[in-house]
Amino acid sequence: MFIWYGVGAVAAIVIAWLAALVHASWHAPFGLVPLAVGIALGFVLVKIAATLRVEDSRRKLIVGAILLAVVAVLAEHAWLYLDFRRQWQAARERSPQVAIFRPEFPWSLPEFLENEATPQQVAVWCIDAALIIVSAATTVAVLSRPPASSHQPPTSS
């Protein structure tokens, strides 16, 4: 199970990076990207469990999916913050006017949150996180069900 968590964390970070690219492109319909992220993460986690032959209980896989979905949420926001820092530097280098009025270094993470975390934005972040977590856990719950056995009803003699 430990290897599943490690590989799952890598998958969560990669999926979060892809989600951050979509968000940064400004083509991210509200709600659809987090659902897609959660479903993709859940699907990948089930496939990893099958490949590694993880025999733990379905409940442990669901709890693991929730934890790894939180990793994905944090990684996505980390990728977006790094993109913000990159854009800050690019704008300073591209425009002398921006360079005059903008500090040389981008905001630190606390400064970024202080300036960007409006009540509306925090609500959107929380809804996105909830959608990712719930869709990942639900996907794992649905896909990790044991196959329906094809037992025959008892025949009377």
Image (spheres, helix red, strand yellow):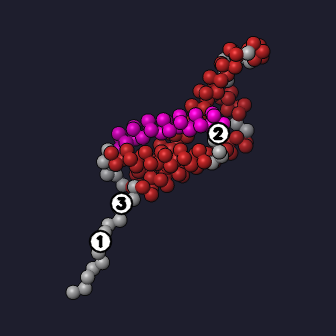
State which tag comes first along the sequence, 3 or 2.
Answer: 2
From the viewer's perspective, is 53 left or right of 73?
left
Q: Say whether residue 15 is magenta.
A: yes
Whole-Å distance between the Cαs marked 3 and 2?
37 Å
Indicate the amino acid at tag 2. His
Image vertical order of residue 58 relative to residue 19, above or below: below
State the SS at label 2.
loop
Quadrant housing residue 78: top right
Q: Say whether residue 121 is magenta.
A: no
State which tag comes first along the sequence, 2 or 1.
Answer: 2
Q: How crowded is mark 2: few (under 14 residues within 10 Å), some or many (20 or more)?
A: few
Q: Residue at horizontal 39%, vertical 59%?
A: 145
> If the image is split into quadrants, where does the C terminus sit?
bottom left
Q: Position of residue 63 (x, y in %)?
A: 45, 50
Indicate the amino acid at tag 1. His
Image vertical order of residue 102 relative to residue 64, above or below: above
Which residue in the protein does label 1 denote? 151
Q: Position of residue 58 (x, y in %)?
A: 39, 55
Whole-Å distance between the Cαs marked 2 and 1?
49 Å
Helix, strand or loop: magenta stretch: helix
Closer to the camera: disc 2 or disc 1?
2
State the SS at label 1.
loop
Which residue in the protein does label 3 denote? 146
Q: Provide the residue span drawn in magenta.
A: 1-26
Which residue in the protein does label 2 denote? 27
Q: Where is residue 115 in the image (x, y as percent from the top left)?
A: 72, 31
Quadrant housing residue 96: top right
Q: Residue at horizontal 73%, vertical 42%?
A: 119
The residue at the far bottom in this view is: 157
Q: How crowded is mark 1: few (under 14 residues within 10 Å), some or many (20 or more)?
A: few
Q: Residue at horizontal 68%, vertical 45%?
A: 123
State which tag comes first along the sequence, 3 or 1.
Answer: 3
